[in-house]
């Protein structure tokens, strides 16, 4: 089992970044800084999502989460899975929390965008596979 950002969202983010990069040629000098910064941010986000695929995978040895600093693996007996709901500014957001219950005390928080699906669905699949 594996989860990663939706391909369409990654492509749309890259396209928006490219569009803003082209718009840099049409705006005034101050706007170039702002639009250029937004273009770089969107292109970096799209590149990160494309490189870190799959973001979360579940195998025989446990859970593996890919990050820019390298993959983190949590063995099944030590994996704790929770879904948290946060409300801020009238919006509700759910995140998947993966915790390693060993001395390493690793906590990984992933949202719907990073998983490509609802965190509740992922949590149910991980619990069925052996996480607590």
Image (spheres, rainbow, N blue to C red):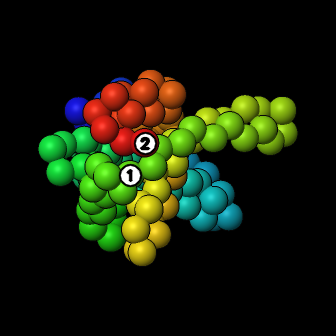
Residue 117 appears in which quarter of the rendering? top left
Q: Viewed as shown, does residue 94 lie left or right of 120?
A: right
Q: Residues within 10 Å of mark 2 (few under 14, many from 20)?
A: some
Label count reads 2
Going by the picture, which residue comes out furthest to the right? 89
Q: Secondary structure at mark 1?
A: strand
31 and 65: which is toward the camera: 65
Q: What residue is at 78 percent from the left and 38 percent from the top?
A: 87
- Between the residue at mark 2 and the residue at mark 1, the CA separation in whole angstroms equals 6 Å
Q: Secondary structure at mark 2?
A: loop
Q: Residues within 10 Å of mark 1 (few under 14, many from 20)?
A: many
Q: What residue is at 18 percent from the left and 43 percent from the top?
A: 59
Which image quadrant: the C terminus? top left
Answer whether labels 2 and 1 touch (C-beta < 8 Å).
yes
Does residue 42 show up?
no
On screen, 125 above or below 41? above
Q: Viewed as shown, does residue 29 lie left or right of 24?
A: right
Q: Position of residue 17 (x, y in %)?
A: 45, 45
Q: Position of residue 34 (x, y in %)?
A: 63, 59
Q: Which residue is mark 2?
A: 132
On screen, 17 above or below 35? above
Q: What residue is at 23 percent from the left and 33 percent from the top?
A: 1
Q: Which mark is residue 79?
A: 1
Q: What residue is at 51 percent from the left and 48 percent from the top?
A: 97
On screen, 59 above or below 37? above
- Sequence-wise, the earlier of marks 2 and 1 is 1
């Amino acid at each position: 089992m594996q989860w990663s950002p939706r391909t369409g969202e990654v492509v749309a983010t890259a396209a928006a970044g490219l569009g803003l990069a082209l718009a840099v040629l049409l705006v005034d000098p101050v706007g170039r800084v702002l639009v250029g910064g937004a273009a770089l941010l969107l292109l970096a986000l799209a590149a990160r999502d494309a490189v870190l695929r799959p973001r979360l995978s579940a195998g025989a040895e446990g859970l593996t989460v890919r990050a820019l600093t390298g993959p983190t693996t949590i063995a099944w007996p030590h994996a704790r899975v929770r879904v948290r709901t946060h409300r801020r500014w009238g919006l509700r957001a759910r995140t998947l929390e993966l915790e390693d219950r060993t001395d390493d005390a690793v906590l990984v928080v992933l949202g719907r965008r990073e998983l490509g699906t609802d965190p509740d669905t992922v949590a149910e699949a991980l619990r069925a596979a052996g996480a607590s």
